[in-house]
Amino acid sequence: MISAQLLEIMQQAELPVDLVWCSYEAATCWAVIAIDTAKLAAMKTHASDFAAQIAQVVFSSHAGYLIPKLILVSNDIDISDINQVVWALATRCHPARDHFIFPAIKEFPMVPYLNSEDKIRGCGGKAIINCLLPEQFYGEMHAKTACFEHSYPQSIKNKVLINWKNYGFR
């Protein structure tokens, strides 16, 4: 339900969002947001301003109050697949430039990592993690995903899958 509410809120604000996913693995401590990169490029913005815009829209809502972290990925990532989300975090998120912290925004007090000082202040744990590459803000994509799914023609993939067990794999 939180995913649907967040999607509706962001689409009503005309943000370039295709889908939102709150996975059970994350105990609703994060929501992953698939961004339509073509619409993002048309906005002519950059990561920090875009994160601030999303924070303003989402964290001021009831659903956003409950979710402390938002992870932004491009819509080539299947956000319901935790492995793809982890891959995006590992390969597309710069450790110094892609973490946006919002320490003054009200926080749901039952988030496990909040300390007593955070709980007394009622804030301190909101963040947006950007897994969009810088060129995606300008409508470009120089890197290509190197994996079985994206790197080979369908005929090769079919042959490999048909013979997978013969190759000694389950």
Image (tube, rainbow, N blue to C red):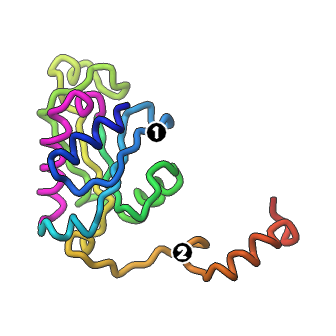
Q: Is residue 5 magenta?
A: no
Residue lying at 35% horizontally and 55% vertically, measured from the top left: 34
Query: In the image, which residues are magenta?
Result: 45-67
Quarter holding residue 50: bottom left
Image quadrant where one finds the N terminus: top left
Q: CA distance from mark 2 to mark 1?
A: 24 Å
Percent coordinates x, y for residue 133 in the rendering: 30, 68
- State whether residue 167 is above or below residue 52: below
Q: Residues within 10 Å of mark 1 (few under 14, many from 20)?
A: some
Who is closer to the viewer here, 18 or 26? Answer: 18
Mark 1 residue element: loop
Residue 141 x, y percent position in the rendering: 33, 78
**Relative depth, front residue between 48 and 80:** 80
Residue at 29% of width from left, 35% of height from top?
Answer: 5
Q: Earlier in the sequence, mark 2 or mark 1?
A: 1
Q: Can you give x and y, in whole percent of width and height, for residue 31 in the image?
A: 35, 41
User: Pointer 1: what residue?
Assistant: 23
Vertical arrangement, residue 133 with respect to residue 154, above or below = above
Amino acid beneath label 2: His
Q: Main secondary structure of the magenta part?
A: helix
Position of 51 compared to 32: left or right?
left
Give the quadrant of residue 120. Answer: top left
Circle 2 sits on which residue?
150
> As drawn, is 44 to the left or to the right of 10?
left
- Image quadrant where residue 17 sits: bottom left
